[in-house]
């Protein structure tokens, strides 16, 4: 790890680099993400890390704990990868680590994966999400085709959590503030998305964040607005009250339930 940068009172950027950067294989997606690996202190692991070997040869309590985070940017000339973390005190595993990380600390991950980048073939773009989706939204805005119409809605805690966003697109950006409401109350953002004037032409839609946000807007985009599924990126990053391991298990169960009911 090279350095950390506090972007807002509750978002910190960790910039990683060093000799390990040569093994990083970038991809063209603006929602690219990595799986961070948190190791058990005092346990000797393979070097280089081999997760398959660890899981086959070591007890389960020594397996790395994984957390998924969006890559905010990759600077190939500097050999740097930036990842932004939302920090709420000592809650969680990855965010408290990021808040106290020091230059020289090791950071281990695998990836990146991803699936979305702004389409050149769209007539306009709609991006919406909460703090967890902000790095991907910011990355998408930077990659937006010049002059393309973009409508952006981002929910954050309050005005201090807003960040400057750069784009060559013709963007209208709306910040929504919870102002004391708990994270995960998605009704404000759902209402704002549905109230946003729908522009003519083919829409390229990106909505990521709390899982209820995605579920609350899926039928709106597909059934009411007729968005082409190929131009629709919906992804739940988290769910209130669940850590990532629990969320991933819930997500698999929910996906299977929706598939069985014919809703997907």
Image: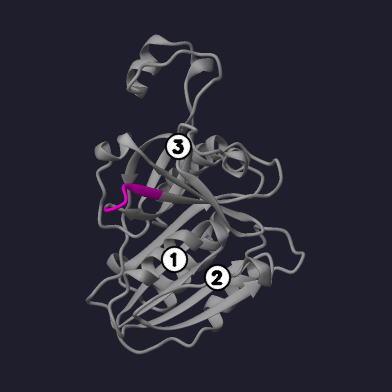
Front position in the image: 185 or 35: 35
Q: Hey, which residue is sitting farthest left in the picture?
A: 121
Q: Please tell me which of labels 1 and 2 falls first in the chain.
A: 1
Would you place residue 173 above or below residue 182 in this image?
below
Observer-nearest of 253 and 51? 51
Mark 3 element type: strand
> Which comes before the other along the chain, label 1 or label 3?
3
In the displayed structure image, the side of residue 23 where residue 42 appears, left or right? right
Q: Label 3 belongs to which residue?
A: 36
Residue that label 1 marks: 137
Which badge, 3 or 2, is on the more N-terminal residue? 3
- Marks 3/2 in contact by CB < 8 Å: the verdict is no
Q: Position of residue 154 (x, y in %)?
A: 55, 70
Which residue is rendered at x = 44% and y = 66% of the image? 138
Side of 2 relative to 52 (left or right): right
Classify mark 2: residues with Cα within 10 Å, few (<14), some (14-19) or many (20+): many
The C terminus: image quadrant: bottom left
Q: Residue at x 63, y 66 (%)?
A: 161
Q: Nearer the viewer, residue 258 or 221?
A: 221
Q: Residues within 10 Å of mark 1 (few under 14, many from 20)?
A: many
Q: CA distance from mark 1 to mark 2?
A: 9 Å
Q: What residue is disc 2 on?
A: 154
Q: Nearer the viewer, residue 105 or 85?
A: 105
Which image quadrant for residue 252?
Answer: top left
Q: Residue at x 38, y 48 (%)?
A: 81
């Amino acid at each position: 790890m090279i350095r950390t940068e506090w972007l807002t009172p509750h978002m910190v950027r960790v910039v990683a680099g060093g000799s390990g950067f040569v093994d990083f294989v970038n991809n063209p997606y603006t929602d690219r993400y990595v799986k961070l690996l948190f190791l058990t202190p005092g346990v000797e692991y393979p070097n280089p890390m081999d997760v398959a070997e660890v899981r086959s040869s070591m007890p389960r309590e020594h397996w790395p704990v994984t957390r998924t985070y969006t890559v905010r940017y990759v600077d190939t000339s500097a050999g740097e990868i930036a990842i932004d973390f939302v920090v709420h005190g000592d809650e969680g595993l990855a965010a408290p680590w990021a808040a106290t990380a020091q230059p020289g600390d090791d950071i281990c991950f695998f990836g990146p994966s991803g699936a979305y980048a702004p389409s050149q073939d769209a007539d306009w773009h709609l991006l919406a999400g909460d703090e967890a989706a902000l790095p991907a939204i910011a990355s998408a805005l930077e990659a937006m085709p010049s002059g393309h119409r973009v409508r952006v809605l981002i929910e954050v805690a309050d005005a201090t959590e807003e960040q400057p966003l750069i784009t060559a697109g013709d963007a209208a950006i709306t910040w929504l503030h919870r102002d004391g409401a708990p994270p995960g109350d998605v009704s404000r953002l759902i209402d704002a998305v549905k109230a946003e004037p729908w522009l003519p032409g083919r829409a390229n839609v990106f909505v990521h964040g709390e899982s209820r946000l995605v579920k609350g807007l899926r039928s709106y985009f597909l059934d009411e607005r007729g968005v082409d599924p190929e131009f629709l990126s919906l992804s739940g990053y988290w769910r209130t009250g669940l850590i990532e391991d629990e969320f991933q298990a819930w997500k698999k169960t929910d996906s299977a339930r929706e598939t069985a009911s014919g809703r997907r």
